[in-house]
Amino acid sequence: MLTVLFYVLLSMAAAHFIYERILLPSLRLHYRNKLFELRDTVRNEIISDHSEDNTKAAQLVHEALNNAINRLHLMTITNRVRAKIRLESNPEIRAKLNREVELFKRCNNLVINQSIQESAKILEKVYIINNLMLISYTFPFYVVIALVANVVKAANNLLTLIGDRKSLEQAVMLLPDRQVAKLVTADGRAFA
């Protein structure tokens, strides 16, 4: 048994190394290149569009894409939790973030809006690939938790059905035989 555990852990370590050190950097580079393409599109819009709101929004998107290009490695579950907690506790940062989001919403340039949406999709994909090993390690635990939750739910439903004795007792005591027979029969046969 200990030998099997050793080989399982060894294979997990090898898979982790191959993914984290070989595959993941290549995947991040692929998505980084997509962000570069989006940034170039936004740069072209900055050059061609002369509307003040659109130019501000385009410059903000340009800066945001530069930040995203340099921070793809930060898209992890632990960083998402930390950011959510700190955003909730710091109204100043939240207000600044809301102001910039409002600037995006005021922008009516289709190319810039599509760039924002496409960059959000890319960041979601990067988030998934950055956390894929953690998800694969914890997946068996999620399955066990889901199964236990379903068993507990089924047990609660069963206990609710069994525990509701008053309805059967009341029917037996208060209803005539024909109505009680309708309550406790299945396919024309009474349960014994």
Image (tube, rainbow, N blue to C red):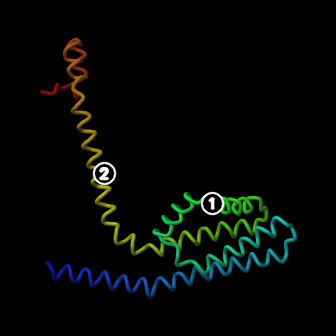
Q: Residue at x 62, y 58 (%)?
A: 91
Q: Quadrant of residue 43?
A: bottom right
Q: Position of residue 17 (x, y in %)?
A: 38, 86
Callout 2 touching callout 1 (CB < 8 Å): no
Quadrant of the rendering where the N terminus is positioned: bottom left
Q: Quadrant of residue 89?
A: bottom right
| Location of residue 182 with respect to 123 vertically, above or below | above
The disc, 2 or 1, on the residue closer to the chain's N-terminal end is: 1
Asked which secondary structure carries label 1, the reply is: helix
Q: Residue at x 74, y 62 (%)?
A: 103
Q: Give the residue pinned by disc 1.
A: 94
Asked which secondary structure carries label 2, the reply is: helix
Q: Position of residue 23 (x, y in %)?
A: 46, 84
Q: Residues within 10 Å of mark 2 (few under 14, many from 20)?
A: few
Q: Quadrant of residue 59?
A: bottom right
Q: Give the residue pinned by disc 2.
A: 149
Which one is in front, 186 or 56? 56
Q: Residue furthest left?
A: 192
For the residues labelled 2 and 1, the Cα–Cα distance comes to: 36 Å
Q: Residues within 10 Å of mark 1 (few under 14, many from 20)?
A: few
**Count the marks: how many?**
2
